[in-house]
Image (cartoon, helix red, strand yellow):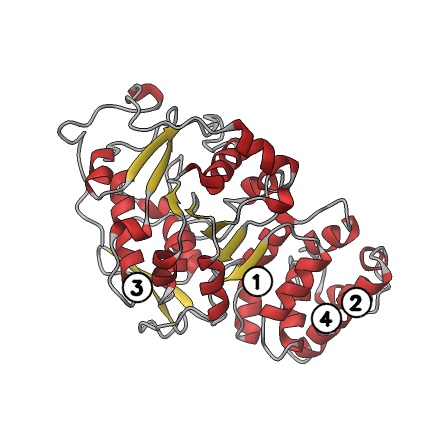
Amino acid sequence: MNSAKQKGLPKGEKPFGGVQGQRPCRESPERAAPSLAGSGAAPQRGPRILFFSGGTALRELSRELVRYTHNSVHLVTPFDSGGSSAKLREAFGMPAVGDLRNRLMALADRTAHPRVYDLFAYRLPKDLGAVELLERLCAMREGRDPLVAAVPEGMRRIICEHLGFFWEAMRGTDFDLRGASVGNLVLAGGFLRAGREIDPVLELFSGLVKARGVVWPVSTKDLTLVAELEDGTLLAGQHLVTGKECGPIRQPVRRVYLSRSQRDTREATVEAQGRVRELIGSADLICYPMGSFYSSVVANVLVKGVGDAIARAKCGKVFVPNPAGDPEQLGMSLGESVRVLLEYLRASCVTPRPVEALLDAVLVDRRCPYPQPLGLDEVEALGVKVIETDLGYAQNDASFDGRALARVLVSMGDGGL
């Protein structure tokens, strides 16, 4: 899906951001103070901003977002094939729960039940032997471990029951507990207890941690993300695409798709379920946020029917490109990333949809030194508006300020787009 790598600035394109200079604003709306003040004073009535994401890129934004709204919706990819989630997926044939847990923790009210938060965030030591780890897990499922014992009684009973289901499921296996997230084990136990259904478990634990927003998987199927590179190489597994565990890719991505497993790389199709369609349809703003472009953002719209639900949603749709280089976007300009995103959005539709039904605007920071060439003229030629504003870009860690971005998105959700 990638076009050839561009060289230099396109004709008519002016430098923008960082040391390259300042590009004249196309559209730079100043966010209305009354809108923000209203949401901040009553976040329970804040806008329903829906994010397609995965991983940890939105952790800071999510923590800041709860200042203004408790109604954000996070559709998360369940295709993670690395870390603790990979061990659970391999052992039990289940969707990845690590990114779901991470987002729940980012939205959690730490002041309501801090002990539950501490338990869900805890990882078993990597330097303990198998017998010691089993003893520790046994103490947890029986409520004897200090971390579990500190949890209020009603919640402690539920957590122990779920750990008990996980304990029984892993008996007789060689499951490796080193570095395992206790929160992931609890969710896995709940998944197994609920007849291999993740939905009721997420609803239960969202309540336990007082999550101020909705976290939901875009699919509940146990599938694998596959990337085909320009040289024809197939990378089967999200962890191979992100560059976080195996080093960055050395060829641009030609296309990504879903398969049944890492061994069977034939393309698989999965349909968006009713709950996902409902969440998209009720949004006040849809955001394709910064993060790993293919494995977090595009992976969500590989689910068939997601594009149709987006097109039918009567709200604004905005893309927030990465402020720094993304290893997955090798050789890709900002303008090209918009084109590629639109291609996948269209492919996700059962019925052909116009651009304006899938994406309204691209949100860029005036000070951010995005990889050149930008290709903003290319974006506008697609019929997509470019909005230039202050997202609090921090050069020292090449990221946006979570609070600044939250304020802009909340304003858009309140009717500012």
- Tag nearer the camera, 4 or 2: 4
**Residue kind at label 2, given as amino acid type:** Glu
Q: Earlier in the sequence, mark 1 or mark 3?
A: 1
Which residue carries the number 3 mark? 349
Residue at (27%, 58%) from the top-left corner? 346
Residue displayed at 82% across by 57% down: 151
Pointer 1 with pointer 3, Cβ within 8 A: no
Q: Which of 321 and 185 lies nearest the eye of the viewer?
A: 321
Q: Amino acid at mark 3?
A: Cys
**In 3D space, how far apart are the residues under numbered discs 1 and 2 (Cα atoms)?**
24 Å
Say which label, 1 or 2, has the lower sequence index: 1
Residue 253 appears in the rendering: no
Q: Residue at label 4?
A: 162
- Structural distance between the alpha carbons of marks 4 and 1: 14 Å
Residue 362 visible in this rendered orientation of the protein: yes
Q: Look at label 1 and name its amino acid.
A: Val
Circle 3 crowding by C-alpha within 10 Å: few under 14, some 14–19, many from 20: many
Rendered position, 102 above or below 186: above
The residue indicated by pointer 1 is 97
Task: Estimate the spatial distance between the alpha carbons at disc 3 and disc 2, rounded to whole Å.
Answer: 50 Å
Q: Are marks 1 and 2 in contact (CB under 8 Å)?
A: no
Q: Residues within 10 Å of mark 1 (few under 14, many from 20)?
A: many
**Residue for badge 2:** 135
